[in-house]
Image (cartoon, rainbow, N blue to C red):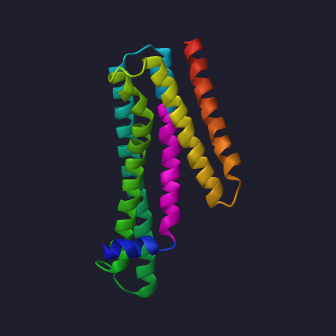
């Protein structure tokens, strides 16, 4: 646990985690918006199809981003270690440098794996109310879209605040992109 705390205190780790979380949150939320528009609104699918599509797509995206981030980050870290070994004329196998490189790659992979599941948990929650017969399917779809847009706003506002920019403008900009994706889904539905 001490090594984990030491790893998080490194200056290069927090920005990596922030970028990974934010990028994957945007990707997964836009994907979920597309699913809700395409499956819930357009096709008239039932609750089971909607929930299953949202959950399996989020799981697949989590696995995909988790594995790809782990492999690419580990490759880059291994290259840096190799260059450092050449400069130091020393093998760094088994050192804290090597262990921390693997730990950073694993931590980033876990963030990328869990973020789509987190956004799915938020966006899918109105459909749980449908199963409890507390909400209709159409209302749940609209609530899911509102929650997805809310996640985009929150992530954009966080980026604005972290970058010393106006969080409201960044948040609204992200909502605007979400609305474009939503409108594009409806347009595709009317064309097909």
x and y percentages locating residue 45 in the rendered image = 40, 15
x and y percentages locating residue 113 in the rendered image = 37, 49
Front in this rendered view, residue 191 or 138? 138
x and y percentages locating residue 57 in the rendered image = 38, 34
For the C terminus, the quadrant is top right
Horizontally, is 101 left or right of 155 in the view? left
Q: Magenta span has 92? A: no
**Residue stretch in magenta:** 12-32
Say which residue appears at 61% left-offset and 25% top-offset. 184
* Residue 114 in sight: yes
- Compared with 7, 155 (above or below) is above
Looking at the image, which residue sits at the far front?
A: 134
x and y percentages locating residue 173 in the rendered image = 68, 42
For the N terminus, the quadrant is bottom left
Say which residue appears at 56% left-offset and 39% top-offset. 150
Front in this rendered view, residue 150 or 38? 150
Front in this rendered view, residue 146 or 160? 146
Number of numbered markers: 0
């Amino acid at each position: 646990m001490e090594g984990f705390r030491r790893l998080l205190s490194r200056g290069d780790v927090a920005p990596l985690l922030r970028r990974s979380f934010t990028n994957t949150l945007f990707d997964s939320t836009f994907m979920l918006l597309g699913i809700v528009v395409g499956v819930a609104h357009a096709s008239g699918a039932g609750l089971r199809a909607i929930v299953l599509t949202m959950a399996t797509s989020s799981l697949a995206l989590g696995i995909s981003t988790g594995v790809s981030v782990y492999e690419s980050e580990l490759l880059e870290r291994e290259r840096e270690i190799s260059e450092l070994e050449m400069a130091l004329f020393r093998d760094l196998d088994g050192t804290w440098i090597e262990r921390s490189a693997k730990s950073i790659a694993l931590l980033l992979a876990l963030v990328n794996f869990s973020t789509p599941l987190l956004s799915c948990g938020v966006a899918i929650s109105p459909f749980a109310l449908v199963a409890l017969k507390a909400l209709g399917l159409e209302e749940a779809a609209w609530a899911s879209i509102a929650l997805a847009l809310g996640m985009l706003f929150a992530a954009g506002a966080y980026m604005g605040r972290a970058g010393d920019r106006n969080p409201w403008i960044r948040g609204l900009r992200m909502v605007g992109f979400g609305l474009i994706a939503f409108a594009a889904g409806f347009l595709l539905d009317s064309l097909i």
